[in-house]
Image (cartoon, grey):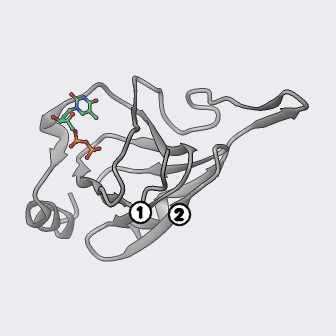
C-alpha cells in the first residue's frame, strides 16, 4: 500500500542542560535532497491546511512547536497521524492526499521538500487525484 511508504522518522536529538538540538541531513536522515523549506505559523484556531496531493514531490513534515494532525489518503487507504514532538518527522511520499488540522495554539509546521515550488506538481482537486491514484499514477 502506498500509504505504508509514509513513515514517522525519529530524528537525531542532542540534549543537554541548555536544551535540545535536532538536525536533519539530506539522504541521511531523510530519503531525499532538501531543495526547499517552508513553515506554517500563526495558524488561527480551527484552520485546516493542506487539502492537496503532489505528483512527484516528497516531503518531511515536522511539528517544530505544538501539535497538529495529518490525515493521509492514498486513494484507497487513509490514516491520521498526530505530530507533537520536535524530533519526529512524517515522511510523505508522492501521490498522497493530505489534510492538516487540529493545530494547537502556537503550533509551527515545518516542511522540508525535495523540490522548489511548482504549482504543476499539485492536485488541488480530490476527484482528479482519485482518478489518477486509481490508475496507479
Ligand atoms: P497552500 O498550498 O494553500 O498551502 P498549504 O499547503 O499550507 O495548504 O499555499 C498557499 C499559497 O502559498 C499558494 O498561493 C501557493 C503559495 N506557496 C508558494 O508560493 N511557495 C511555496 O513553497 C508554498 C508551499 C506555497
Nearest to the observer: residue 3 or residue 22? 22
Quadrant, the C terminus: bottom left
Q: Residue at x 67, y 29 (%)?
A: 23
Q: Position of residue 5 (x, y in %)?
A: 47, 59
Q: Residue at x 38, y 66 (%)?
A: 71
Mark 1 lies on residue? 102
Label 2 CA crowd tier, 10 Å (few <14, some 14–19, many 20+): some
| Mark 1–mark 2 CB contact (< 8 Å) | yes
Secondary structure of residue under mark 2: strand
Side of 129 where 54 appears, left or right: right
Q: Position of residue 28 (x, y in %)?
A: 64, 32
Compared with residue 102, is residue 55 higher up or lower down, i.e. above or below? above
| Extreme-right residue of the structure | 17
Label 1 CA crowd tier, 10 Å (few <14, some 14–19, many 20+): some
Side of 60 where 53 appears, left or right: left
Nearest to the observer: residue 104 or residue 27? 104
Q: Quadrant of ligand 1?
A: top left
Q: Disc number at residue 82? A: 2
Q: Residue at x 37, y 64 (%)?
A: 72
Q: CA distance from mark 1 to mark 2?
A: 9 Å
Nearest to the observer: residue 117 or residue 130? 117
Quadrant, the N terminus: bottom left
Q: Position of residue 36 (x, y in %)?
A: 38, 25
Amino acid at each position: 500500500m502506498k500509504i505504508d511508504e509514509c513513515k514517522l522518522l525519529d530524528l537525531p536529538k542532542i540534549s543537554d542542560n541548555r536544551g535540545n538540538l535536532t538536525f536533519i541531513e539530506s539522504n541521511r536522515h531523510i530519503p531525499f535532497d532538501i531543495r526547499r523549506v517552508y513553515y506554517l505559523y500563526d495558524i488561527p484556531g480551527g484552520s485546516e491546511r493542506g487539502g492537496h496531493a503532489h505528483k512527484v514531490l516528497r516531503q518531511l513534515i515536522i511539528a517544530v512547536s505544538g501539535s497538529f494532525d495529518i490525515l493521509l489518503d492514498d486513494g484507497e487507504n487513509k490514516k491520521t497521524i498526530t505530530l507533537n514532538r520536535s524530533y519526529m518527522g512524517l515522511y510523505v511520499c508522492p501521490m498522497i492526499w493530505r489534510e492538516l488540522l487540529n493545530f494547537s495554539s502556537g503550533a509551527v509546521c515545518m516542511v522540508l521538500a525535495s523540490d522548489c515550488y511548482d504549482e504543476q506538481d499539485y492536485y488541488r482537486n480530490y476527484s482528479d487525484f482519485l482518478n489518477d491514484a486509481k490508475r496507479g499514477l
